[in-house]
Amino acid sequence: MSAIENTKVEEVFEQYPKHIQSRLLILRQLILDTAIETEGVDHVDETLKWGEPSYITKKGSTIRIGWKQSSPDQYAMYFNCNTKLVDTFKEVYRDLFNYEGNRAIVFAENDEIPVDEFKQCIALALTYHTRKHLPMLGK
């Protein structure tokens, strides 16, 4: 697991319930691993947006991960709702994921993450500005 360099981000992770914290750290690592594996992505900034860990690349759209006390057994990866990202995921992956409108992929605490497909979603977000003009983002 990659170390969290931003102390404010680390503090937010530490505030999550332990059982959710471990799941969110898996999402974080999938983002970082996907960035390394994705052509055209040279750096990921890890910061806070809306009080949640957020990840942005020069040519990408912001990805946030988080948990809400109102849904204690769920956690999510959030995407900019003004993009075509979640609509594309729905078209390509149908009901493989649970979606929240056009802004998130939501997981239940014990869900098995389909890693390969999920990493493709992450890669699309990390490179969004290079493909936003393509139908279904080139997928």
Image (cartoon, rainbow, N blue to C red):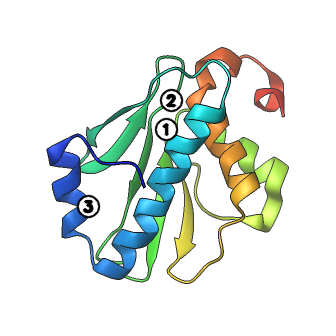
Q: Residue at x 55, y 51 (%)?
A: 30
Can residue 71 be seen from the camera position used here?
Answer: no
Foreground disc of the pair 2, 3: 3
Identified by mark 3, the residue type is Phe
Residue at numbered disc 1: 80
First in sequence: mark 1 vs mark 3: 3
Residue at numbered disc 2: 61
Q: Residue at x 58, y 56 (%)?
A: 101
Question: Could you tell me which secondary element the residue under label 3 belongs to?
Answer: helix
Identified by mark 1, the residue type is Asn
Can residue 50 be seen from the camera position used here?
Answer: yes
How many residues crowd mark 3 within 10 Å: few (<14), some (14–19), many (20+)?
many
Q: Position of residue 96 (x, y in %)?
A: 77, 66
Describe residue 21's horizontal placement relative to residue 120 as left or right. left
Distance, label 2 to label 3, CA atoms, is: 22 Å
* Quadrant of the rendering where the C terminus is positioned: top right
